[in-house]
Image: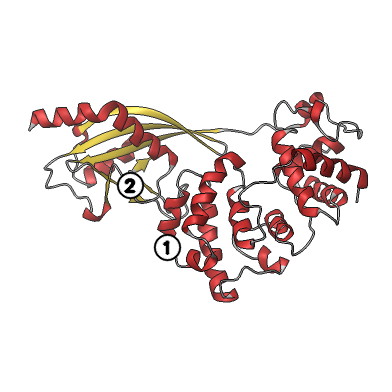
């Protein structure tokens, strides 16, 4: 344990740490939900989702009775939707195996779906069950810079980072220390333009220089994808949605039919006995997911008195209040349609009679 390092971090926390976050409680259930939400997501984004989630499902018993569709709706917009599927699966396990009581044993926590070493360590430590080091993205960045550790992502580097994290983590005030490390990583030792002037480690021989990071940091390859989206609207102001298949990006959410080629979209229209000529207009939206830039061309199909169309009657949802979880890209498409195109489309169709 590095006493000098941890004492500097803890002194900073006393003055600057975020001590009033809504999940600062000794309830392992609420800590678990917050830790899952905080994976790859900023605190400010998480807070309203967290508050709404625990208001709706205040304990494990209420959560275990929720359907996956209900949870997906509540999670809609937060992204990384596999997280909520894992929460759903874990809740079922905790209900059956632990009688709706969150397990205290570290290995039992680690065995739950969607929980890795860092998340299990954070839950266990913040709940007061143990004193463990963590290695989330913020902690990694601090340790890489302080000890000048390679930015390569491989098992050797990961092992070194874990060793350093364990080395600097104190046995007392562990929860305050790991919260401080996460706070410093997100507020001071940021990904770009770190504020070294106010860093509590600035006088402890930190080895970080901007040049080292520029040389060492790996560039992520961003894949560019074209997607074709159909927003089908009927005369009752309802939108046609399909549940996205398991194994696909955005699985278990609902969306208008989407395709990765215009040809496949036209084949779908033909199969459903829908005329491509009735596509009213199109507009483009951009969407970014991890290492993917998606250019989406959205086509609006206004359906009126088309009796031969082969679309399930159960797949229509009120456009003004969609009550299932939808991906961000489809939420964007609906907002663009309603703000810029809806009035013109309706007027066109009414004129045609």
Q: Residue at x 57, y 75 (%)?
A: 99
Q: CA distance from mark 1 to mark 2?
A: 17 Å
Q: Residue at x 88, y 50 (%)?
A: 167
275 vs 251, nearest the viewer: 251
278 vs 176, nearest the viewer: 176
The answer to whether 32 is drawn above or below residue 342 in the figure is below
Residue 152 visible in the picture: no
Residue 294 in the image, given as x and y percentages of width and height: 47, 33
Quarter-wise, where is residue 299 in the image?
top left
User: Which mark, by number, is residue 67?
Assistant: 1
Residue 130 in the image, given as x and y percentages of width and height: 77, 63
Please identify the quadrant where the C terminus is shown: top left
User: Which mark, by number, is residue 186?
Assistant: none
Model colouring: secondary structure
Residue 245 in the image, given as x and y percentages of width and height: 41, 53
Q: Residue at x 67, y 65 (%)?
A: 109
The answer to whether 135 is drawn above or below residue 341 in the figure is below
The answer to whether 46 is drawn above or below residue 216 in the figure is below
Outermost residue toward the top in this view: 211
Taking the image as shown, residue 321 lies to the left or right of residue 201, namely left
Give the mark nearest the N terminus, 1 or 2: 1
Taking the image as shown, residue 173 lies to the left or right of residue 339, namely right
Mark 1 element type: loop
Taking the image as shown, residue 84 lies to the left or right of residue 4, namely left
Please give the residue where the numbered disc 2 appears in the rendered image.
322
Quarter-wise, where is residue 344 in the image?
top left
320 vs 140, nearest the viewer: 320
Residue 255 in the image, given as x and y percentages of width and height: 36, 45
Residue 37 visible in the picture: yes
Outermost residue toward the left in this view: 353
Label 2: how many residues lie within 10 Å, few (<14), some (14-19) or many (20+)?
some
């Amino acid at each position: 344990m590095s006493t000098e390092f941890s004492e500097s971090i803890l002194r900073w926390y006393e003055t600057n740490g975020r001590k009033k976050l809504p999940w600062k409680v000794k309830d392992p259930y609420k800590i678990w939900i917050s830790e899952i939400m905080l994976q790859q997501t900023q605190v400010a984004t998480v807070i309203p989702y967290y508050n709404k989630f625990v208001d709706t499902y205040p304990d494990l018993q209420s959560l275990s009775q929720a359907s996956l569709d209900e949870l997906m709706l509540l999670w809609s917009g937060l992204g990384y939707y596999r997280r909520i599927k894992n929460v759903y699966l874990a809740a079922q396990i905790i209900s059956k195996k632990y009688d709706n009581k969150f397990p205290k044993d570290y290995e039992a926590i680690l065995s739950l779906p969607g929980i890795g070493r860092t998340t299990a360590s954070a839950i266990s430590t913040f709940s007061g069950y143990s004193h463990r080091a963590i290695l989330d993205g913020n902690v990694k960045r601090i340790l890489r810079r302080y000890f000048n550790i390679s930015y390569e992502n491989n098992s050797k580097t990961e092992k070194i980072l874990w060793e350093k994290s364990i080395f600097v983590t104190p046995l007392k005030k562990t929860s305050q220390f790991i919260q401080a490390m996460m706070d410093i990583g997100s507020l001071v030792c940021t990904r770009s333009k770190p504020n070294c002037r106010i860093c509590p480690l600035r006088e402890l021989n930190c080895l970080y220089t901007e040049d080292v990071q520029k040389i060492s940091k790996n560039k992520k390859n961003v894949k560019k994808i074209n997607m074709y989206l159909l927003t089908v609207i009927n005369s009752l102001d309802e939108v046609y949605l399909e549940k996205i298949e398991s194994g696909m990006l955005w699985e278990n959410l609902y969306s208008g039919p989407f395709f990765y080629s215009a040809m496949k979209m036209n084949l779908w229209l033909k199969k459903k006995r829908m005329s491509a000529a009735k596509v009213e207009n199109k507009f483009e939206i951009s969407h970014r997911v991890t290492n993917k830039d998606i250019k989406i061309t959205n086509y609006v199909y206004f359906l009126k008195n088309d009796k031969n169309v082969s679309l399930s009657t159960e797949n229509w949802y009120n456009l003004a209040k969609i009550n299932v979880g939808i991906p961000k890209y489809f939420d964007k498409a609906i907002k663009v349609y309603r703000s810029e195109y809806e009035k013109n489309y309706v007027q066109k169709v009414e004129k045609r009679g």
